[in-house]
Image (spheres, coloured by chain):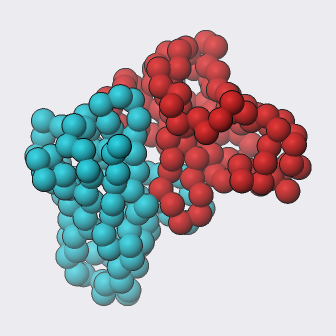
Chain colours: A red, B cyan
Amino acid sequence: GAGVSQTPSNKVTEKGKYVELRCDPISGHTALYWYRQSLGQGPEFLIYFQGTGAADDSGLPNDRFFAVRPEGSVSTLKIQRTERGDSAVYLCASSPGGNNEQFFGPGTRLTVL
Amino acid sequence: KQEVTQIPAALSVPEGENLVLNCSFTDSAIYNLQWFRQDPGKGLTSLLLIQSSQREQTSGRLNASLDKSSGRSTLYIAASQPGDSATYLCAVRTGGFKTIFGAGTRLFVKA
């Protein structure tokens, strides 16, 4: 079956602009995670959804970052007033439940000029 | 605060060698530990998941062990091949819902 997909694969934007990154999890997976990864580092946890609700958003760096999952499947990560320091690869993962194996998408590379 | 460390940061071995990658974590209160591989410019591929109640998991040439009390996990790769060249990451699921990753070990297997 289809894996986790993320769109776009690359996004270039200017400082101060608003961006949306999309994640389509594996069908039937109730848990969804967002991470960001800088070069040479492991992924950094941002937010965890169980169903439609954000069960843990403690990794979001500030209030410019927000994520939604209105119907319990597709999720959108939204970044307002982008800064150059937001440049990274944003990864999404899903799992059948909260304590199960996580499956990752290919990521969205965000570049803020 | 949970911290995950992977040693070594990089490793180069000749083809056919058996090798061990190390992962340590500071807080033993974890739900599970997962090993991933990441190829350059790609997402993460899950290799093995060990629940907190388990001691080890095996898949093909890979064997992962978990010692919660000492805060350590090892990933053993038997008979390494050039196709095993990648970055290997370990991640621990904490008592909340966070998953904390190490920085990874970059493995190069020479033909």
Q: Position of residue B23 (x, y in %)?
A: 27, 59
Quadrant position of the C terminus of chain A in the picture: bottom right
The front one of A82 and B110 is: A82
Q: In the picture provided, is A54 more to the left or to the right than A10?
A: left
- Using the image, determine if residue B107 lies above or below residue B5: below
Number of marks in picture: 0
- Image-based side of A1 in relation to B60, left or right: right
Q: Is residue B60 visible?
A: no
Residue A100: image quadrant is top left
Residue at the front extreme, as displayed: B1
Q: Residue at x 62, y 45 (%)?
A: A90
As displayed, is residue A16 above or below residue B81? above
Q: State the residue in front, B26 or A105.
A: B26
| Location of residue B108 with respect to A95 vertically, above or below | below
Q: Position of residue A26 (x, y in %)?
A: 51, 29
Which residue is drawn at the image coordinates 20% and 56% (left, top)? B73
Tell which of B103 and B61 is nearer to you. B103
Q: Position of residue B44 (x, y in %)?
A: 47, 52
Residue drawn at point x = 22 percent, y = 37 percent: B29
Q: Which is more toward the observer, B98 or B107? A: B98
- Classify residue A65 as left or right of residue A27: right
Rendered residue at 22%/70% (across/down): B20
Q: Position of residue A10 (x, y in %)?
A: 75, 51
Residue A110 seen anywhere in this rendered image of the structure: yes
